Amino acid sequence: MPAYPVKVQPPTEDKRWGLVMATMKRHGYQSNAMIETLHTVQESFGFLDDDSLRFVSKALNVPLSKVYGVATFYHFFTLKPQGKHTCVICMGTACYVKGAGELMETIAKKYNVHPGETTDDGNLSLVTARCIGACGLAPAGVFDGEVNGKLTAADTLTKLTKWE
Amino acid sequence: MTANGQIKIFTLKIDGKDVSARSDQTVLQVCRENEYFIPTLCHLEGLSNIGACRLCMVEVAGQRKLLPACTTMVSEGMEVTTTNDKLAHYRKMTLELIFSERNHTCSVCVSNNHCELQYLSQKLGINHIRVPYRFPKFAVDASHPYFILDHNRCILCTRCVRVCDEIEGAHVWDVSGRGIQAKVITELNQPWGSADTCTQCGKCVNVCPVGALSEKGRSVAENTKRSGFLPYLTARRKEKI
Amino acid sequence: MTLEELQEIKAGEELARSQKKKSIHVCVAAGCMSQNAEAVLNTIEGQLKEKGLAKDIDVKGVGCMGLCAAGPLVSIEPENRMFQEINQANAFLVTDNLEKGKKTTNDLASDSPFFKRQYKIVTENCGVINPERIEEYIAFDGYLGLYTVLHDLDQNEVVQNLIKSGLRGRGGGGYPTGLKWSTVAKAVGAKKYVICNADEGDPGAFMDRSVLESDPHRILEGMAIAAYAIGADEGFIYVRAEYPLAISRLKVAIKQAERKGLLGNNIFGTTFNFTISIRLGAGAFVCGEETALIASIEGGRGTPRPRPPYPAESGLWGKPTLINNVETFANIAPIIRKGAEWYASIGTETSKGTKVFALAGQVVNTGLIEVPMGMSLREIIFDIGGGIPGGRKFKAVQTGGPSGGCIPEEFLDIKVDYESLTKLGSIMGSGGMIVMDENSNMVDVARYFMEFCMSESCGKCVPCRVGTAQIYDILTKFAERRATEADLTLLEELCDVVRNTSLCGLGQSSPNPVLSTLKYFKHEYMERIQAEVNQE
Amino acid sequence: MKAKIATTWLDGCSGCHMSFLDIDERLLAIADRIELVYSPLVDNKVFPDYVDVTIVEGAVASVDDLAKIKKIRKHTKYLIALGDCAINANVPSMRNPIPVQEIINRAYVENAFIHDVMPKHPALPELLARVMPIHEVVPVDVFIPGCPPSNDTIFYAVAELLDGRIPDLTSKTRFGA
C-alpha cells in the first residue's frame, strides 16, 4: 500500500466497479489481491480490457506489465469480449478418450472457429475446458452454462443451430 | 546470511579439487572464481538468479537430480561435478532447443560476433541444430526513440525484466502468456515507445545477451553490450543503505 | 465452543434423525448437479408434501455417492436402498417405494462390488451428510479430532502421530506427511502458514472436488490440526476457479466454523488461533506445484522457482509454509480420532491407508471410489469398475494424469501403491485413473498429454518450454505418419533432456506418458514410421 | 587414386562458393589429389554415380532442391553442408513464418512496378512450404557453419577429409562467422 493511500477512481461511472472496489478493499488494497481483483473484474464485465487493467494497476500499485503478465498467464482470464453464446467442450482425459476431439473438430469446421476464439459475427465463442469434472458423463459440454453429457456430434450441432 | 558474523567458510570439491568458499556463495560463483567453465544465459552477476536457462546444471554428489549452479548455495563437503559427457550432452541439447525456438539468424543479426548465444554454441561445439526450427512469426518493435526490440532473437532469459525491476526500479518489462507462447512485453503489451514508465536508461539493452534488444542507429560492430556496470551498481547501492 | 457444546449438537442431530422414519438422500455433488439433481430434490420434497409424509421423511442433498455415470443418484436411508438416473419425471419411483419390497426399473444394487469393495475414510461422509450443515459434520464426530489435539496432545505428539500413521502426501509425490509437518514445525519463525492445495488440475481427476463439495468441514478440521502441530495461525485454500460449487460450499463452511468458534481466536477455549481464507486459481495446471502455487497466492504469475529452499523453510512471503493436498488433509481427523495404529494397519508396507480414485474412460462404472492401498488394478477396474463396456478388450490404464503413464494388461495384478506404480513408469499422482480399450491409440494418447503439458508449461525454463513443444511436434509427425527413425531417436533424447533438466515437477514428469507408451506400446510408434520413400 | 569431389548449390547466394574459390593458389596444392566431377564451376551437368565428397551450399527451398539433395545423398560418401544456409536455412528461411502464396504475391504482384503477374512457367520449381536445412531432409556428415565460412576454414576441412579425417571445426568457425 502506498504511504499516503489515495483512492483511485474507477475509469467510468459504471456501477459494476463497485464490486471491484469491494474486492480490493476486502484485501486492504494489497498488491497480492491482484488475481482476486481480476476475477471480480471478469465476473462483472465478462473480460479484462486495457482500461480495467490500468485501473487495477493503479489501485493496487502494481506495475502495468506485471498486471498484463498475470492476466495473460492464467487461462481463466480473457482479454477479449466473449460471444453472445458460449460453448465449452470438455477436453479432460475421460472426455478425450470418449471422442471429445471429434466433437471439437465438427464444431470448429462448421463454424470456422478455433477453440478459444469467437466467430466473426460475435455470436459463438468456442472454449475448451481442461476438465469440468463430469467425467461420468463423458464426453461433456457446457452450453451457455448448462452442462450436457454423453454428447454426440449430431446433438452438439443441433444445440448450436438453435443459437444461429 | 546478511550479517558478517554469520558467514562461514566451507571447503568443497569441484571436479575432484578442493576449493574454499563463503557460505553465502553459489556453486556458480565458486566455480567461476576458480576458473571452471560453466555456461549460463539467464544468470548475470548483479541480478537475482532464477535458474531458468538450465545451462549451468551440475552434478552434486548425493543428489538424485541435477542442480542449477546459479541457484544452489555451497555447503560444507559438497562434491560438485561441473562437466562430464552427460552434462555436456544436456547443455548442448538445451542450447539447441533455444536456437530452435525463435529465428536466430546469426548472419544478419545485430549482435553477430558479440552474442552470448552464438559464443556458447561455438564453445559447446554445436555446428548444427538437430531439433527442427519452429520458425514462429514475430514482429520487430522499433517504436522507441533509441532502442529496438526484436522478438525473433529473444531467448526469454528475462534479464531485461529483472534489471528493469531490480536495478532501475521501473518494471516496464514483464513476461506475458506462458509456455511456448511466452514473450517479453512492455507495459500492457504496447509499443515500447509508448510506455510512459520507461526511463530510457538502456540497462535492459546492455544486459541482453543476444540481439533481441539493441541500440538504434548503430552498426552491428558498434552494437556491443556493456553489462559490467551491474555488479558496480549493486555494490554502490549497498554502500548507501 | 466446548466439548459439551459439541456433544450437544451431536445429540441434537441424533434426536432429530430418530424422529424421522426415513430419510431420502439426493446426491448434489457436481456430477449429479449437472444432471439437474437440484430439481430432483425439489420434486421429491413436493411429492412427500402431497403425500403428507413431509413430517416423517427427511429429504436432504448430500455429497458425492460415487457412481457418477448413473446419476442423479438417490438413496433411502437407513436401509441404503439406491436409485439411479432419477429425474423429475421418474422421481415418483422413489417416493412411491418408501417401503421395502417392489423392485423398480431404476434400482441400483447398493451391495454391488462397486460399493462393497470400497473402504471409506476420506469419503466416509460423502453421500451421507448435507455438506452445507456443520451440525451434520459434527454429528459424525466432526471437530472431535481438533478438540482432542488441542486438549490432549502437544505439537510434537500430533506430528509423531502422523509419522506413525504412515500417511503420505496424496497430491502426487507421496512425500511422508509426518516428516513434512515436523520440518515445518521445526522451522524457525514466528509466522507460519498452512496451505491446502485444491488446484486439482489433472484432466480426468475430480477426487478433490468431490471431497470439497461433499464434506468441506473435514478439510478445515485437517488444516486446523496441521496449523496447531506446526505453529501456524493463518491458512489458505487455493482452489480452482473452475469449481464454483466447491468454492461456495467452502465459503459456507468457513463462515459456519467461524460462527461456532471452530475457526478464529481461542479455539475450544485454548490459546490456539487459526483463520482460513480462500484464494482462487485461474486456470494454470502448474500452480499445483508448491512454489508456483505460492507465487500465485502472492498475486503473481504462477511460475515455480528452484528448490531448495523448500517452502517448509521459506514459503509464502518467505515464511515457513506447510502445503498439503485436499485428500491429505481429509485423512487427518480420522487418524487423530481412530489412532495412528489403526491407520497404519490399512494398506501396504510402504503406502498406508486408502486412496481415492476418479475412475473414468472406457469403463462401465465411472465415478469416484476409495480403496485400500494395495488393491490390484484388476480388482479396481474389473470388480469395482465393472470392466470394459461393449465387450471390448482392455488395453491400458493411465494413472497419474499428465505426469503419469500408461500401464498395459500384463501388469493388471500389480498391487497399487506409490512404489509399484513408479516402478512401472507411472505414478500414483492425485488419483486419476483413465481406462482405455482396444480402440485407443497410444501415440494419440501420448500426444494428447503432451499437448496438455505444452500448453500448461509456464515457460520459465528452456527444456520444458521448448522441449514439450518439440516433443509435441514430433508426436504430431507420428500421428500423421510422417515420422522417420531419426524422429524416434530424437523423441527419446528430448524426453531424457526434459525429464532431467526441467525446473519443476511438471516439466520433469511431462515425458512420462511418452516414455511409458514407448516402453509398452513401441510397436504403435513403429507402425507410424514412414516407409522409406524412393529417394530419387 | 584421386578423390572425386562435387560441389553444388541449392537456395543460397553462392557466397560460399566464392569463399571456396578464395582458397586461391592453395587449390593447386591439392589439385593432384582431387578430381572435380560435378560443380557449377565445371561443365558436367549430370551428377555422377559415385562421389567421395559433395560440398553443398544453400538450403532446401523448392521441390527441385529436395529431389536434388536426395539424389546427391544417394551417390555421395561424405556429404558436407557448407555455410549457414545449408546448416540452419539462414536468410532463405526468413520467409518461413509467412505462407508461400503471400510471399510470392508480395514479390511479384504487390511490389511490382511493371509486369505485376504471378510467375507461372513449367520450368519454375514449386516452393516448399518452409525452407529447411539439409540435415532435416538427409543425413549430413560434416557441417561447416559460417556466412560464408572463411576460405581457411574450407581449405582446412577439405584437406582434413583428403587425409582421411573428419575435420573438427569448433575453434575455426561458427554460425554467422
Image (spheres, coloured by chain):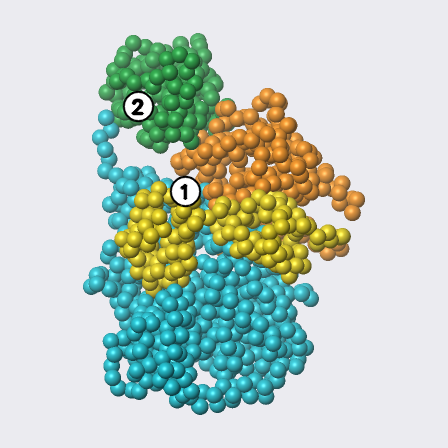
Q: Is residue D3 above or below residue A19?
A: above
Residue A121, label in figure = 1
Numbered circles on residues, count:
2
Which residue lies under the disc numbered 2?
D126
Q: In the rendering, at what x and y percent does residue B61 appear? A: 53, 53
Q: Identify which residue, C296 or C81, lies in the foreground.
A: C81
Chain C representation colour: cyan
- Specify the quadrant of the image occupied by residue D34: top left
Give the orange chain's letter: B
Q: Residue at x 45, y 78 (%)?
A: C129
Give the yellow chain's letter: A
Chain D representation colour: green
- Determine the CA span between mark 2 and mark 1: 37 Å
Quadrant into which the N terminus of chain C falls: bottom right
Q: Amino acid at mark 2?
A: Glu
Q: Identify which residue, C536 or C113, lies in the foreground.
A: C113
Q: Identify which residue, C205 or A16, lies in the foreground.
A: A16
Q: Identify which residue, C375 or A115, lies in the foreground.
A: A115
Give the SS element for disc 2.
Answer: loop
